[in-house]
Image (cartoon, rainbow, N blue to C red):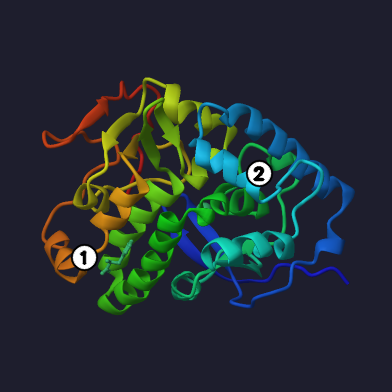
């Protein structure tokens, strides 16, 4: 029998309820993928590979090739793991979807990256409100071959376990950091701004919008600034934060966040589209097309 993803609870977000799945680790049921599933992978893979040349960080594209990812078939986690373990000691594990926060942090802290085993339906090529195999594999996995980024992800997991013990406000601050880096980060290179965030590279529309639209702000990464900035999950971002290097990210996040959480608790949060006097502005967004009904 084909496995069916099991939802256990729902998480309230600013776009409504998003399902949370069981904590179970499952073997990728590769034989259960249908011809349609493989075609969905192929369509998305080809489309994004073409679009991302000159838009995604070159290393991101190169790493997909190091993994041997191709349009031919949905990759096997086992094959990817051979490459990944040898390179950075990370390992992919199969899951049914979004995990409870603490479970997710614990996996990252142990250098295990949870990958949703199922892929979206053909009617969902452009948008899905929860992560699927395409987002997780195509978007997140390539940079796990980068030693510095790999360490950052592990440190984030350990930081998450710690923040969970401190309280919900600390978790909100920490989650913003993940959102604006791992999911929606841009990186400044000699060739210009490039995408490294998984949420962007797995979206056709946002791959173009994040770099080329006049609407959003593009602002230099600053740890505290990011951690006090709200966001919404159901529209393109109003602000993208730009790092200079993965080393910068690692160095900025190395200190113990405990005093930082205490300080941030005293400060107001910033709206997703705000530009502050202290910002290093790459582009001030025109704000065209922004919704103003809830960047929470
Ligand atoms: N240094 C952070 C802490 O003490 C942990 C962390 C590292 C968080 C990297 C995010 C990214 O909590
Ligand atoms: Fe993601």
Q: Residue 211: image x %, image y %?
A: 43, 27
Q: Residue 67: image x %, image y %?
A: 66, 51
Residue 127, quarter of the rendered image: top right
Q: Nearer the viewer, residue 149 or 217?
A: 149
* 10 Å crowding of disc 1: few (<14), some (14-19), many (20+): few
Q: Is residue 84 above or below residue 53?
A: below
- Residue at 63% across, 45% down: 64
In front: label 1 or label 2: 2
Q: Are marks 1 and 2 in contact (CB under 8 Å)?
A: no
Q: Nearer the viewer, residue 267 or 41?
A: 41
146 left or right, relative to 168: right
**Tally of numbered discs:** 2
Pointer 1 residue Cβ closer than 8 Å to ligand 1: yes
Q: Is residue 202 visible?
A: no
Of label 1 and label 2, which has the lower sequence position? 2
Q: Quadrant of ligand 1?
A: bottom left
The secondary element bearing badge 1 is classed as loop
Q: Is residue 92 above or below residue 190?
A: below
Name the residue that disc number 2 marks: 65
Name the residue that disc number 1 marks: 255
Q: Is residue 37 above or below residue 55?
A: below
The secondary element bearing badge 2 is classed as helix
Residue 109, quarter of the rendered image: bottom left
Inter-mark Cα distance, 1 to 2: 34 Å
Q: Residue 90: image x %, image y %?
A: 55, 67
Residue 51, quarter of the rendered image: top right
- Residue at 63% across, 36% down: 126
273 left or right, relative to 68: left
Q: Nearer the viewer, residue 204 or 18?
A: 204
* 10 Å crowding of disc 2: few (<14), some (14-19), many (20+): few
Q: Is residue 67 visible?
A: yes
The N terminus sits in image quarter: bottom right
């Amino acid at each position: 029998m084909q496995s069916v993803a099991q939802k256990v609870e729902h998480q309230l977000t600013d776009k409504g309820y998003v399902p949370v799945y069981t904590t179970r680790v499952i073997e990728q049921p590769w034989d259960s993928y249908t011809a349609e599933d493989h075609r969905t992978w192929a369509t998305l893979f080809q489309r994004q590979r073409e679009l991302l040349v000159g838009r995604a960080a070159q290393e991101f594209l190169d790493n997909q090739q190091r993994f041997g990812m191709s349009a031919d078939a949905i990759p096997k986690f086992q094959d990817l793991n051979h490459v990944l373990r040898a390179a950075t000691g990370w390992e992919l594990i199969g899951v049914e979807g979004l995990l409870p926060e603490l479970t997710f942090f614990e996996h990252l802290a142990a250098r295990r990256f949870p990958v949703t085993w199922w892929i979206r339906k053909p009617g969902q090529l452009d948008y899905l409100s929860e992560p699927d195999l395409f987002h997780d594999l195509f978007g997140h996995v390539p940079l796990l071959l980068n030693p510095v980024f790999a360490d950052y992800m592990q440190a984030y997991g350990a930081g998450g376990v710690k923040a969970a013990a401190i309280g919900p406000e600390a978790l909100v601050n920490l989650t913003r950091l993940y959102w604006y880096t791992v999911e929606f980060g841009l990186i400044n290179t000699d060739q210009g701004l490039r995408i490294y965030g998984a949420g962007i590279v797995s979206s056709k529309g946002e791959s173009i919008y994040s770099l080329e639209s006049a609407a959003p702000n593009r602002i230099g990464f600053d740890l505290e600034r990011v951690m006090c900035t709200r966001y919404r999950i159901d529209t393109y971002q109003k602000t993208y934060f730009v790092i200079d290097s993965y080393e910068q990210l690692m160095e900025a996040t190395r200190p113990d966040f405990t005093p930082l959480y205490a300080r941030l608790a005293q400060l107001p949060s910033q709206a997703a589209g705000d530009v502050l006097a202290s910002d290093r502005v790459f582009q001030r967004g025109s704000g065209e097309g922004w919704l103003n009904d809830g960047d929470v």
